[in-house]
Amino acid sequence: MNEEQRAKSVDALMRWSDDSGIDRSALERIFDGLEGASGRGAPLQDPAFLCPGLEARPWHDPGRFPWVRLLERDYPDIRRELLEQSGAMSAHPESGTLAASGQWTTYHFFNLGRRYEEHHAQCRATSRTLQQVPGIASAGMAYFSRMAPGTEVKPHCGFTNTRIRAHLGLVIPPDCAMRVGTETRSWEEGKVLVFDDSFEHAVRNDADSWRAVLLLDTWHPELSADECHALGFLMTLWKSYLG
């Protein structure tokens, strides 16, 4: 975000907190982040919006999150629906800027407050499981992510440290991996990886077949309910900044 966008965000959040009856003091660190008082993040962590005081680690233990078990339990149905919709994928909105090579396509369920009703209707099992992830409709995004052979996504940092991102492996060939921070890991079909995408990360698929995951965001577990509510409002505002 540029300085004008930050100032507009502060003004909008002030009005929203007054209308919502949430004391501004409960949102102090969000205001600090918007006003630049949060400073820099951890090494290799450089989001556009950094909320201070949140645990910062590139990779998280999936066992901390009860909804991970639900995703892994429902993996067969989610994978089946991915395969059924493989012809309905569209280019990833950032493929033009982030994909160094190859083809990167998506099938969205949520995007910064927007719900894709037709896709939920087409993928009812996936939709039911996603509904059980806290903050799924407001924390960021949820979509099938498919990368063709030879696809490489350049190193980049996500927009904010207020969300935690998960990948459920759906179709995982050998020779594909993701680096978050300084550590590289690969996916397993039916297993979930959890990471903080505000850290620099990069993805590659060196296999001779495509790779697919279900990507989803949830709120950072150290945020309060009021902070999540406020950030959900800001996400709808920031959508115009992110394009």
Image (cartoon, rainbow, N blue to C red):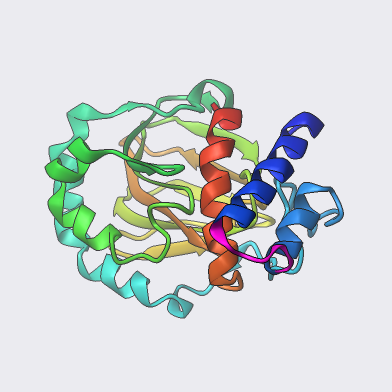
Position of 150 with respect to 53 (left or right) is: left
Q: From the image, which quarter does the N terminus lie in?
A: top right
Residue 209 occupies quadrant: top left
Image coordinates of residue 171 in percent, x first then y, are 28, 48
Residue 122 occupies quadrant: top left
Give the residues in magenta: 20-25
Q: Give whichever of 240, 93 is nearer the camera.
A: 240
The answer to whether one can see residue 200 in this image is: no
Position of 102 with respect to 78 (left or right) is: right
Residue farthest along the top direction in this orientation: 96
Residue 124: in magenta span? no
Name the residue at 65% across, 39% down: 156
Position of 50 with respect to 95 (left or right) is: right
Above or below: residue 68 compared with residue 5: below
Image coordinates of residue 155 in percent, x first then y, are 64, 39
Above or below: residue 70 compared with residue 116: below
Image coordinates of residue 139 in percent, x first then y, are 48, 54
Position of 221 with respect to 161 (left or right) is: left
Name the residue at 45% across, 38% down: 206
The answer to whether one can see residue 103 in this image is: yes
Q: Give whichever of 71, 14 is nearer the camera.
A: 14
Name the residue at 39% across, 57% down: 136
Q: Give whichever of 51, 98 is nearer the camera.
A: 51
Image coordinates of residue 61 in percent, x first then y, are 51, 74
Q: From the image, which quarter does the C terminus lie in?
A: top right
The number of numbered discs placed on residues in the rendered structure image is 0
Name the residue at 14% across, 57% down: 77
